[in-house]
Image (cartoon, coloured by chain):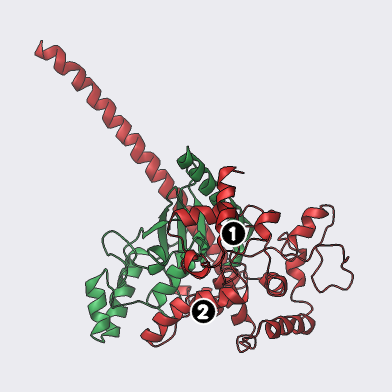
Amino acid sequence: MTVLFYQQASRARLFKEYKEVQREKSADPDIQLVCDDSNIFKWTALIKGPSETPYEGGVFQLAFVIPEQYPLLPPQVRFLMKIFHPNVHFKTGEICLDILKNAWSPAWTLQSVCRAIIALMAHPEPDSPLNCDSGNLLRSGDTRGYRSMARMYMRLTAIPKKGS
Amino acid sequence: MANSASLPALSSSPNDLRKKKRANRSAKLKQCKLDARRDQWLSQVKNKGSNGESSPPIPSTRPTGPRKLDPPRDNATESLLGLQDSETERRIARKDDRPCSSSISSGCFSCSATEDEEEEDGDSTALDDWEAVADALIADHHHHPEEPKPSITAPVPTPAPPSVALKPPEPRAWRPDDAFRPSSLPNLSKQRSFDVGRGFRNGGHAVVSVSVPSSCPICYEDLDVTDTSFLPCSCGFRLCLFCHKRILEADGRCPGCRKPYGMILDGSPPVFLLSRSCSMNIR
């Protein structure tokens, strides 16, 4: 009974976020949030790689799975594309970000999570790496190595198709 | 006997295969749709960036297009987590940024607050006094009278949603500092818990000066009279009793400052009684 009630609460909140996203579509040109047609607990986001990073020019797809206790629990977010970043698991796309774990606050929204992920892309945290290779490159001071690897994977996976 | 048993199994496996194929196809379709949407969106942004240039989005031309849009965005995302050059500073900033900025806007989502400050060329970031911030914002209104207008004429009912609720036929909302604003209107403003980008300035101004949101930032339901007089945390983050109760049942930390509710509220048991009575009769 209470579970159903909570699910309804999170559904209501997600629906309001959806309306807000529709209303303020142009407010943030770097983020596009799309809700699954049939399930409001599944979202996809397209985010643009921040400028002056190796991810610039790429468009990255994120998958959101939202728990029924949302917004008390954070959404589960992962990259759908391969990305070479110290805090993103290379195979699963899992993201290591404090606000997606213990520092989550119900006042955050899906949109703000996207913004936090863009900020994480611009400022990797090599001391808590999910991708050790990437973290080690940065920690050993090989910024150039990291940047070229990251750019290579960005070009391989996240560049939008030509002619469409 | 064995044959008759194996027959249905054989005949069912092609069915399964077909099902799988169908599932695959629908997944592919979905991916196609997403790709199309992405490309459409990208070309839109690009065209905007390159002044209506209708050429298709070719990656090699990308620096001309989106880069124009990028720098302010980048600043904003940086300020989101209070990111700075030094790593340790960054860590601290990430933790401290939220509480302090959310106390300025009194529970308003800190990200948008910092973003707003960023927009104002840092002149308001230097002010730590609430009143000073409010004054600066008012002064800002006078300096750029054309700034707040778009947000008012836009369908976003930013400045005073309660008044909108009171007088639905009114095509535009009153600004809080508007001389023609009827004094009978309540001096409330909507709490912006969302990204707001443009149009936040008004909301921010109102929140700073009055600090009572009209809707719960957690569930986005309207706050009723009991909710608006309910201040569970010293950081000033307001929320409805229902959400407060749910949070107490979960990790019990204030969404505004992430401090445990109990520690701050040691001396005020009535608040807890209130929340309990709320749980008895679910609204």
Chain A as rendered: colour = green
Q: What is the chain letter for disc 1?
A: B
Q: Which residue is mark 2?
A: B79
- Residue neighbourhood size for the residue with mark 2, other residues' Cα within 10 Å, grouped as few (<14), some (14–19), many (≥20): many
For mark 1, does the 10 Å Cα neighbourhood hold few (<14), some (14 to 19), or many (20 or more) residues? few
Residue B264's x, y, as percent? Answer: 51, 70
**Residue located 43% across and 55% down the image:** B250
* Sequence-first tag of 1 and 2: 2
**Amino acid type of the residue that numbered disc 2 sits on in the rendered structure:** Ser
Can the viewer see residue A154 in this picture?
yes
Point out residue B134 in the picture as x, y percentages from the top left corner.
Answer: 71, 80
Mark 1 touches mark 2? (CB < 8 Å): no
- Residue that appears at 35% across and 69% down: A154
Q: Looking at the image, is mark 1 or mark 2 nearer the viewer?
A: 1
Check residue B88 in the rendering and tell me which mark sits there, or answer none. Answer: none
The tally of labels here is 2
Q: Which is more toward the observer, B164 or B59?
A: B164
User: Which image quadrant: the N terminus of chain B?
Assistant: top left
Residue reaching furthest to the top: B1
Indicate the amino acid at tag 1.
Pro
Which chain is rendered red in the image? B
At x 79%, y 79%, the residue is B145
Q: Specify the quadrant of the image occupied by residue B123.
A: bottom right
Instruction: Calculate the distance from the C-alpha at mark 1 to the C-alpha at mark 2.
Output: 38 Å
Judging from the image, mark 2 belongs to the subunit labelled B
Q: Is residue A154 left or right of residue A110?
A: left
Q: Residue at x 80, y 63 (%)?
A: B186
The percent position of residue B271, horizontal first and vertical second, equals 58, 59
SS class, disc 1: helix
Q: Quadrant of residue B28?
A: top left
Residue holding disc 1: B270
User: Which of B150 and B135 lies nearest the eye of the viewer?
Assistant: B135
